[in-house]
Amino acid sequence: MPTLARWYIKTSFAWLALALLLGVVSVILPASWPSAAFAPVQMHAFVVGWITQLIFGVVYWMFPKASTEHPRGSEGLAAATYVLLNAGLAARAVGEPMAALGGPGALWLIGSALMQWLAGLGFVLNTWPRVKGG
């Protein structure tokens, strides 16, 4: 398994653990503002952090080779995708509670959305050549 695929997959497990922890916190503190402020973070950690990132890692690892010279496409683009996805998730985890409390969270959320969109675009660009017709 390529190193970057391991990073994607192990990081997805970390986001899963965080999402589950936030779920426990929301049950313990059901009516408090911290629980409500972290609800979008929990959902994003599950969907983007765990599921999407796990898919990115498995696709990077298992899809057909793009070429002999670059079997997994551009390693640099794949690494940038990893960094952008996780930086965007981290920015979301900071920005959501800030926005819920009336702070400057909107800027964090805009940055988060931009980074995650760029990560998705990078993933598509790097993976597209590996999807071959039969």
Image (cartoon, rainbow, N blue to C red):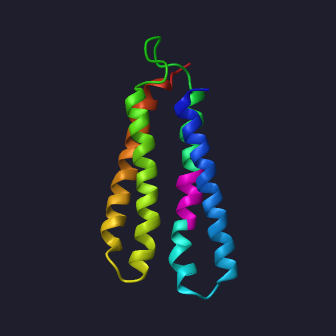
> Magenta stretch containing residue 52, yes or no?
no
- Residue 91: where, in percent of width, then height? 40, 61
From the viewer's perspective, is 54 left or right of 94?
A: right
User: Residue, x 52% and y 21% (percent of image)?
Assistant: 133
User: Residue, x 44% and y 17% (percent of image)?
Assistant: 70
Above/below status of 40 relative to 1: below
Above/below status of 123 relative to 102: above
> Magenta stretch containing residue 48, yes or no?
yes
From the viewer's perspective, is 99 left or right of 54?
A: left
**Viewer-side residue, 44 vs 15:** 15
- Residue 48: where, in percent of width, then height? 53, 54
- Residue 2: where, in percent of width, then height? 56, 26
Give the magenta part as a residue range. Answer: 42-50
Above/below status of 86 relative to 123: below
User: Residue, x 40% and y 52% (percent of image)?
Assistant: 116
Which of the 4 image quadrants contains residue 47?
bottom right
- Residue 87: where, in percent of width, then height? 41, 52
From the viewer's perspective, is 134 left or right of 110?
A: right
Look at the magenta stretch and give its main secondary structure: helix
User: Residue, x 41% and y 83% (percent of image)?
Assistant: 101
User: Which corner quadrant holds the N terminus?
Assistant: top right
Task: Report the residue that reaches farthest toward the bottom.
Answer: 31
User: Which corner quadrant holds the C terminus?
Assistant: top right
Q: How many marks?
A: 0
